[in-house]
Image (cartoon, coloured by chain):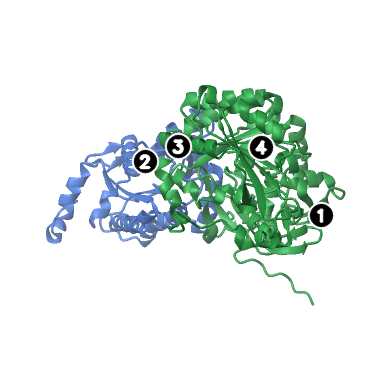
Amino acid sequence: MKPTWKHALIIGASSGIGAQLARKLARSGCRVALIARRTELLDELVQEINGQSPAPIAIAYPHDVVHYDEVPGLFQQICRDLGGLDLVIYAAGIMPAIGEDEFNFSKDRAIIEVNVLGAIAWLNEAAVRFLRAGEGTIVGISSVAGDRGRRGNPVYCASKAALATYLEALRNRLARHGVAVVTIKPGPVDTPMTAGQRLPLMIPAERAAAAILAAAARRVHTAYVPGIWRPIMFIIRNIPSRIFRKLNL
Amino acid sequence: MTTAPKAIRSLRMPEPDNPPALPQDRLQRLWAWGMAASGMSYVWRPSTIEGIRQILTYASAMGIPVGLRGAGRSYGDASLNSEGICLDITRMNRILDWDPTTGIIRVEPGVTIGQLWQYVIEDGWWPSVVPGTMFPTVAGCVAMNVHGKNQFKAGTIGDHVLEFELMLADGTVRRCNREEDAELFHAAIGSFGMLGCFTSLTLDLKRVHSGFLRVEPIAAHNLGEMLAIMETRRSAADYLVAWVDCFARGGSLGRGLIHQANYLAPGEDPFPAQSLCVQNQELPDTFLFGLVPKAVMWRLMKPFVNPPGMRLVNLGKYLAGLRQSGKTFYETHAAFAFLLDYVPSWKNAYLPGGLIQYQVFIPHTNAEAFFREQLTLCQKAGLVPFLGVLKRHRPDDFLMSYLVDGWSLALDFKVTPRNRQRLWDLCAKMDAMAMDAGGRFYFAKDLTLSKPWRDRFLSEERVQRFLELKHKLDPQNLLQTDLYRRVFGTRPS
């Protein structure tokens, strides 16, 4: 069945996957609330979307996801402005460059604050609302990086693993109330986050966004994007630790 | 010594640095009674006038609209305030004063019609006007200015309100009656909770000399015959209502069964104290010889709630009506008045899409042609109403009046995900037809009317007066509902 979302909220919408999700949802007639820290990029995106729509369909909410105290009020404001809410996508995430032997707590803390605590702050609000409504879809963008603890960026991997586990728990809590919680595990996607990096099986953000919305419409539990990552990660997850630590993955 | 009233739990004012947030534990999904619409709201159920005032003050400080809700018995979105605060008055349900010699009663807003008649009937009184169900609150009924099967004779419930106290959005209370604050009196009745919250209402009741009504069913073979019979009997009847088989076509279009009911004269009932006893009025809660609880009845109805099933049910009802026609019987007030309560939760048989009721009020001269065209249009569209109810009406003098010297035909439509858009399109066509026929719309039922029709239906002058009064009494536009936003404007930014 085609998704019938009428009101969506995207956290982390100014660029990359989030921006493409916003464009796609708006094109389908869904009203979108877009949250991001970078006001200029956000405003440009909203102008672009509204310029292509007969009536204003996108609303910008500049917000830094680490300002957790703002979340309850802002979430309610968005619901009022949109006139409802069917879909929440948490796409905010950071992956700062980490040197091979670098152990930088301030960078690590920032990763956890954005990738995990920000997600919990926003998705808890969505969970309560959808639980009471008896319907709704929550999508969290985790990563294939969360499937194993890789040497390249320990806390980024840990943050995505934490997010995936949190989403699984949320799914187990909310399924009986009619709420879908979808975990997305993208491989490398061509976004500002991965700019300048040469990564295997990289796909454009637009393709990733299409796959994410398709997975959310099907209410799958966990979707690898693109799908080829599912068998790859199956193999990688099952590599014995003694061998894995010798590989430069 | 007086003490300051305690603040209602969780009325915490907003933190200055963060966007205002309402308490999560107040969030609920509320449904229109027809279940074809719903909305998420933050619900408070105050039990005192001070409690209402605190919520209004809190909402004003938060800048969040408040919707008033009684028992939530309006078919459409009149009691929904999606994403805002819902002020539910059902806990304010005390009888404040009752004089059995004059039949004048003063009640809190959340008293239901059921509570009301059960309280007064043993003193020989009955509410002058009741809707088809006893579950709405008195305040809800007055806010929507509901009518009953005796509207042509007794008017609307507003015609029997002697006085009320109304809390405005700023927390002040105004006492209104036909002499004192008469403009607000005539505007607040029927203004669907947009001018203030009733905190008490004083009503006059109808003296009855028996717990029974004399009821005569009369079969009508088509719409023309039905209208003619009802018009002839109007002057002699206390109540007059007709069921219409909306599936009948051609020469039988609009056939159905009329029920005329009359109060019994003093002395006609040899045992009035018995028949006026509450326990002898209450509707049975079982059927099939008392073996099956009525609570399960809607489940048995469900397989029939589709076009072929309802065609069969309507045919059966009509044929049974032909046999009953002309055979007078006695029925209790409650049994005659509250037909909708016979099958508890019957609306569940319409799930998952719910139902809407489309009811327009058409002037007498245009009524027959309009209803013919309306029923034919529904049949051609393949969206035949499962139930039709015809009533005679008279005008009233309230600002937001929906009444005409004419007729209304209330039509129940099943809503499904597949037919929803077609049904709304059909309603839009019927709206246009109704406008051309001088028709009016009823907000207690409506879920489909769009803003452009508003001025033609109520007249630009009335709408302007209403909006000016609202702006004067509620400059912050604090009182809102989904219905108000749909018909009168959008949510302010």
The chain containing the residue under callout 3 comes to B
Q: Inspect the image, locate mark 1, and give the three-letter code of the amino acid beneath it.
A: Arg
- Between marks 4 and 2, how big is the CA–CA gap? 39 Å
Q: Inspect the image, locate mark 4, and give the three-letter code of the amino acid beneath it.
A: Phe
Find residue B85 and report its horizontal and vertical position in percent. 60, 53
Q: Colour of chain A?
A: blue
Front one among A166 and B32: B32
Q: Are marks 2 and 1 on the same chain?
A: no
Q: Mark 1 or mark 4: which comes first in sequence?
A: 1
Label pair 3/2, CB-CB below 8 angstroms: no
Disc 1 target residue: B175
The residue tagged with tag 3: helix, strand or loop?
helix
Q: Which mark is residue A17?
A: 2
Disc 4 target residue: B488
The residue tagged with tag 1: helix, strand or loop?
strand
Q: Write the residue at 53% across / 35% down.
A: B322
Q: Tell me the quarter of the image containing the C terminus of chain B.
A: top right
- Between marks 3 and 2, how big is the CA–CA gap? 51 Å
